[in-house]
Image (cartoon, helix red, strand yellow):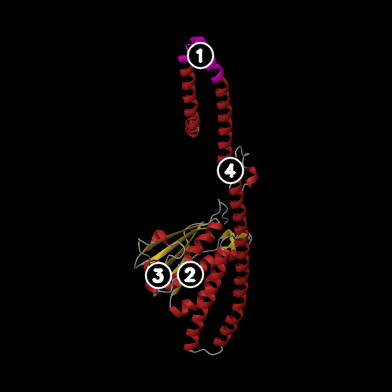
């Protein structure tokens, strides 16, 4: 700190040293007694040292205040230390102007985001009505063409829910209802929704013993399992998808699909990342696993993916919440 202070005051220090040298030279050429020279120099240096000491004290104090404010981004400009010069006053006015502009931009952005979420939430709920009506109409005539149309309609419904999940994922705290739920019931809700896809794709569903109680949010865990089932069905052309548990804390979903390449595995939870198989499929949004991971993070659960390309993928979800998993 002292070295930095001396560097910041180097011009003043050099000027003072030159003045001292000039002072000593004049006294020396005047042939004054040495005692008088040293006495005069001492009288000049003493108040100078005191002034530098006080200045150094204020320098350190201001540095500590500004360093503390650096870690408190939300602190107001009124907490800045008092300006001691015209330049410092100018800097503080400039920072105050920037701060006001920043807060106005944040407020405007927050308002725009809230309005956007409200609009799309309303849009999703409105669009579900014609989707449900079309689904009923297609079920009136059991034909192969209607079955295909029903599958495409189901995809539309899923994508609308994906939009809603994406909009809400930023902060689920206000929507979470943590409680004790039976894992089997949660899984069955997701499986029931995708039952037509299992039948249409001729994929076998296997379920192990999931009759345990978990501490979670039912709606959002169903949402996660739906995203994972959607992915599994998309990339499993034949074989089966099995839902089971490894122990009292881990839900396992294992498919016999095309798998994920070793190079893509570290990035599968990144937003928008589709990987090699996703690019080949040309239908992947790169949002399913991203939303699943973000949701599980807020539920304080963890997810892990293991895959053998060409042989299938295994997803492990640890549903424990600080040893609050109940049986």
Q: Work out whether mark 4 precedes mark 1 in sequence or the reverse, and give the earlier one.
A: 1
Magenta stretch mostly in which secondary structure? helix
Q: Position of residue 275 (x, y in %)?
A: 39, 66
Mark 4 or mark 3, which is nearer to you? 4
The residue tagged 3 is 278
Q: Are marks 4 and 2 in contact (CB under 8 Å)?
A: no
Label 3 packing within 10 angstroms: few (<14), some (14-19), many (20+)? some
Q: Which mark is residue 229?
A: 2
Using the image as rendered, state which of residue 27 and residue 323 is in the foreground: 27
Residue appearing at x 49%, y 28% in the figure: 15
- Give the CA separation, mark 3 to mark 1: 87 Å
The residue tagged 1 is 37
Q: Position of residue 107 (x, y in %)?
A: 63, 59
The residue tagged 4 is 69
Q: Work out whether mark 2 precedes mark 3 in sequence or the reverse, and give the earlier one.
A: 2
Q: Is residue 321 visible?
A: yes
Q: Is residue 307 above or below residue 324?
A: below
Using the image as rendered, state which of residue 226 and residue 205 is in the foreground: 226
Using the image as rendered, state which of residue 183 and residue 99 is in the foreground: 99
Q: Is residue 9 above or below residue 92?
A: above
Label 2 element class = helix
Of all residues shown, which one is farthest toward the front?
30
Image: magenta residue range: 27-45
Label 3 element class = helix
Label 2 packing within 10 angstroms: few (<14), some (14-19), many (20+)? many
């Amino acid at each position: 700190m002292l070295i930095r202070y001396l560097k910041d005051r180097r011009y003043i220090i050099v000027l003072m040293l030159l003045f001292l040298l000039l002072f000593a030279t004049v006294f020396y050429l005047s042939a004054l007694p040495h005692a008088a020279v040293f006495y005069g120099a001492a009288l000049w240096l003493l108040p100078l040292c005191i002034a530098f000491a006080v200045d150094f004290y204020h320098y350190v104090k201001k540095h500590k205040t500004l360093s503390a404010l650096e870690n408190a981004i939300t602190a107001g400009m009124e907490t800045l230390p008092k300006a001691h010069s015209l330049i410092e006053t100018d800097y503080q006015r400039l920072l105050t102007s920037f701060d006001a502009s920043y807060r106005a931009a944040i407020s405007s952005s927050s308002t725009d985001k809230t309005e956007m979420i409200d609009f799309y939430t309303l849009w999703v709920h409105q669009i579900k009505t014609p989707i449900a009506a079309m689904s009923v109409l297609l079920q009136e005539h059991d034909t192969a063409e209607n079955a295909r149309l029903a599958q495409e309609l189901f995809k539309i419904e899923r994508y609308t829910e994906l939009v809603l999940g994406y909009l809400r994922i930023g902060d689920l705290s206000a929507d979470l209802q943590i409680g004790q739920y039976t894992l089997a019931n949660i899984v069955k809700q997701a499986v029931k929704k995708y039952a037509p896809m299992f039948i249409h794709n001729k994929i076998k569903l296997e379920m192990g013993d999931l009759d345990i109680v978990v501490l979670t949010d039912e709606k959002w865990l169903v949402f996660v399992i739906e995203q994972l089932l959607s992915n599994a069905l998309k990339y499993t052309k034949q074989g089966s998808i099995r839902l089971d548990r490894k122990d009292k804390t881990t839900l396992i979903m294992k498919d016999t699909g095309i798998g994920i390449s070793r190079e893509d595995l570290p990035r599968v939870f990144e937003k928008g990342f589709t990987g090699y198989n996703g690019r080949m499929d040309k239908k992947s949004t790169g949002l399913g696993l991203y939303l699943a991971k973000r949701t599980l993070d807020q539920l304080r659960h963890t997810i892990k993916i293991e895959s053998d390309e060409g042989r299938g993928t295994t997803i492990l979800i640890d549903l424990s919440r600080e040893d609050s998993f109940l049986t």
